Amino acid sequence: MTYIVNDACIACKYTDCVEVCPVDCFYEGENMLVIHPDECIDCGVCEPECPADAIRPDTEPDMEKWVEFNRKYSCLLYTSDAADE
């Protein structure tokens, strides 16, 4: 299992969830956050911290598209962050 960020995060950008993540698996995009599903350790501490209720477990129905969305954009953002350094 992993956690994902869905479209409820668009234009929200609270970072309460990021602050409690023990493995830094969040990546910040232009208008939302994403979780790298391969880096997430499934601890769940981020989910109750999200005021927008945008963080969901991938075990809920119809989450496959959000797992792929989060994977795609976290990889793109990671590559972008590495290039900036």
Image: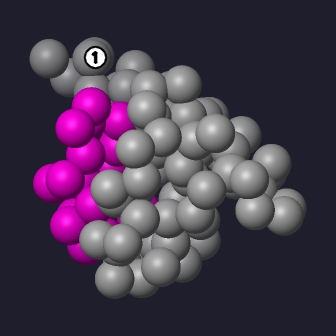
Say if 36 sits above or below 16 in the image. Answer: above
Q: Residue at x 56, y 52 (%)?
A: 4
State which quadrant residue 37 falls in: top right
The one nearer the camera, 43 or 58, is 43
x, y (%) of residue 3?
Answer: 54, 49
Residue type, numbered disc 1: Ala
Residue 11 x %, y % = 40, 77
Q: Residue at x 40, y 44 (%)?
A: 43
Label 1 element class: helix
Instruction: Residue 66: tell me if it is visible.
Output: yes
Q: Is residue 56 above or below residue 84?
A: below
The quarter of the picture where the N terminus appears is top right
Residue 23 image offset from top left, x and y in percent: 27, 31
Q: Is residue 2 left or right of residue 13?
A: right
- Magenta region includes residue 20: yes
* Closer to the camera in the image, 84 or 58: 58
Q: Position of residue 64 (x, y in %)?
A: 80, 48
Magenta region, residue range: 13-32
Tell me which corner region of the image, top left, top right, bottom left or bottom right, holds residue 72: top right
- According to the picture, the residue beneath numbered tag 1 turns out to be 83
Instruction: Residue 30: tell me if it is visible.
Output: no
Image position of 25 (left or right of 6)? left
- Compared across the picture, whether 67 is left or right of 82 comes to right
